[in-house]
Amino acid sequence: VQLVESGGGMVQPGGSLRLSCAASGFTFSSYDMSWVRQAPGKGPEKVSAISTGGTDILYADSVKGRFTISRDNAKNTLSLQMNSLTPEDTALYYCARDPPGTGWASDYWGQGTQVTVSS
């Protein structure tokens, strides 16, 4: 299993970033997928999750209305469009695999991509 995130960086408050995750080593279309973030000194937070076919989507209240998760099963990629970013969104963002039937629990994570929101 390999999950490789990209797209992080530094952005000013109010800005946007698009994160991507390239998945390999497993049948991507058979797994729910998530984005999880961890800010310095805080525990991990599941930001968003998407079911195998994209029909079921979850967002944390903290990002609802600002972030959009999507997936392309043909390209084995997971994306997270992040708009209206605030300093509170600063964190290391991980792509995670959620086996079916686990209630959105993750069993594999990537190495993460850093998102820093600062003026």
Image (cartoon, grey):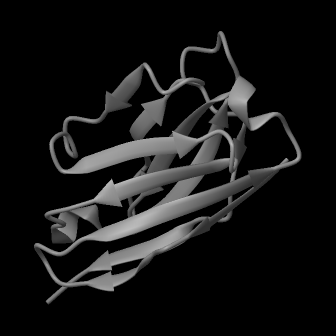
Split into 4 quadrants, where in the image is the C terminus?
bottom left
**Residue 38 in the image: above or below residue 18:** above
Residue name at image x 48 percent, y 46 percent: 35
**Residue 2 placement (x, y as % from top left):** 81, 54
Residue 88 location in percent, x, y? 20, 63
Residue for point 13% across, 77% down: 13
* Rendered position, 114 above or below 79: below
Query: In which image quadrant can residue 42 be found?
Result: bottom left
Q: Looking at the image, which residue sits at the far top?
A: 101
Q: Residue at x 58, y 35 (%)?
A: 33
Number of labelled discs? 0
Q: Position of residue 77 (x, y in %)?
A: 62, 51
- Residue lying at the far front of the rendered structure: 74
Place of residue 31 in the rendered image (x, y in percent of width and height, measured from the top left): 68, 27
Towards the viewer: 72 or 40? 72
In the displayed structure, would residue 59 be above or below residue 117?
Answer: above
Left or right relative to 112: residue 82: left
Image point 53% across, 71% down: which residue? Answer: 113
**Left or right of 110, for residue 66:** left
> Is 93 placed left or right of 99 in the picture?
left
Kindly indicate the quadrant of the structure image that contains residue 72. Answer: top right
Q: Is there any visible trace of residue 46 in the rendered image?
A: no
> Image height check: is 112 above or below 27?
below
- Can see residue 100? yes
